[in-house]
Image (cartoon, rainbow, N blue to C red):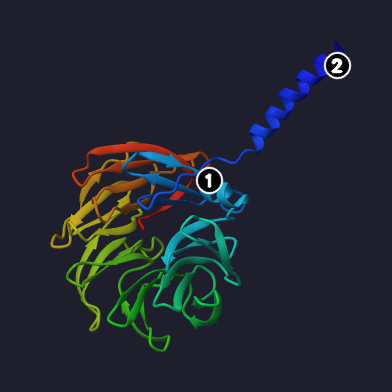
Amino acid sequence: MRTIIAFIIGIVLFGACSEHSEKPKITIQNTDILIANQGNFGWGEGTLSLYNPSTKSVQNEVFKAVNGKSLGNVFQSISTHKNSYYFVMNNSGKIIITDSMYKQTGEINGLTSPRYMYPLNENKAYVTDLYANGINVIDLAKNEITHTISCRGWSEKGVFIDGLFWYTGSSTNQLYAIDISNDKLVDSIQVGSSPESLIVDNQSCLWVLCRGDEELKELPCLVRIDKPITGELDLKIELKENPTQLRYDTRLDQLYFINGDIWSMSSKSAIPKPFIAHQNRTFFGINIDPISSDVYVSDVRDFVSRSEVFVYDYQGLLQDTFFVGIIAGDFFFP
């Protein structure tokens, strides 16, 4: 009798172990939207989620399921180049490279606190950084740092215009320009205190969102630079509170940013208007689907629970909601 009982227990335990060790099945489609979940700073794991807008299906912890290990901490942003993905891990000081199926193929090390990666061409990319006092230049063929362009403090978001890489110097009140032909700092424009994000609109105007400086009693603002080559600041819109995450829908010529609520405006307007009320949610990350113009925004709740993502159409009508990982911060549309 004891032998029979032991046999039955053995079967149950074996089945439980087999079930536990079985890897989650991941279905990858080329229409998936990638979501970078930062994880808690210093101790949480960053995770990758996939969302398919056609099937409205979500898959979480995709990188771990494919590779059997965690990404690291903090999963700041996503970039792509030549059918590879580059996952920028801020606190871990590295960039993880995967193929289109999210299998790791390489790694870029030696970074201080990387924020965003911007490929320039087939062989070169810039990586902005929080603490390095410089922008790292990456050899994409070797996946190595070739040299560092010295800059003042924190470099954050950037855009390319007419052979220049303009980036926000977030610890200053300046927008800086690097000549991509020689990696030299060649220009700067005073915008507002703590410039955080920027976009280029369909008229090749630069828009910069600045968070202001409470100690200097400088309000946050949204500024437009009509001609970046001459540094003409032709519009300044003063804001309140703590605006972040300036985004742009090229198809409908609409700017969006988070400031408690989600705000939007046409590039031809000077008056931002409420788009989605926060309703006690903590909006954190936002981006626009370039094909559908749907607006994706994350509610990070208490910063330790799983984030909830809300999808709205361009009229502000809710299309879907779903849960991803902790502190969903970056939405990437391949």
- Residue 29 x, y percent position in the rendering: 40, 49
Q: Residue at x 42, y 69 (%)?
A: 82
Where disc 2 sits, the SS reads helix
| Residue 196 appearing in the image | yes
Amino acid marked by disc 1? Glu
Of residues 22 and 137, the one drawn nearer to the viewer in this rendering: 22
- Residue 77 x, y percent position in the rendering: 45, 59
Of residues 227 and 46, the one drawn nearer to the viewer in this rendering: 46
- Residue 129 x, y percent position in the rendering: 49, 70
- Residue 131 x, y percent position in the rendering: 54, 70
Which of the two discs, 1 and 2, sits closer to the camera?
2
Q: Quarter holding the N terminus? A: top right
> Does 310 appear above or below 178?
above
Where disc 1 sits, the SS reads loop
Quarter of the rendering containing residue 228: bottom left
Q: Label 1, label 2: how many angstroms apart (C-alpha)?
A: 41 Å
Amino acid marked by disc 2? Thr
Q: Residue at x 62, y 51 (%)?
A: 69
Of residues 116 and 144, the one drawn nearer to the viewer in this rendering: 144
Is the C-beta separation of discs 1 and 2 under 8 Å?
A: no
> Does 120 appear above or below 272?
below
Answer with left or right where residue 247 lies relative to residue 202: right
Answer with left or right where residue 200 lies relative to residue 67: left
Quarter of the rendering containing residue 281: top left
Q: Which residue is mark 2?
A: 3
Q: Which mark is residue 61?
A: 1
Number of numbered discs on residues: 2
User: Would you call the spot at circle 1 few (<14 residues within 10 Å), some (14-19), or many (20 or more)?
Assistant: many
Q: Quarter holding the C terminus? A: bottom left
| Residue 40 appearing in the image | no
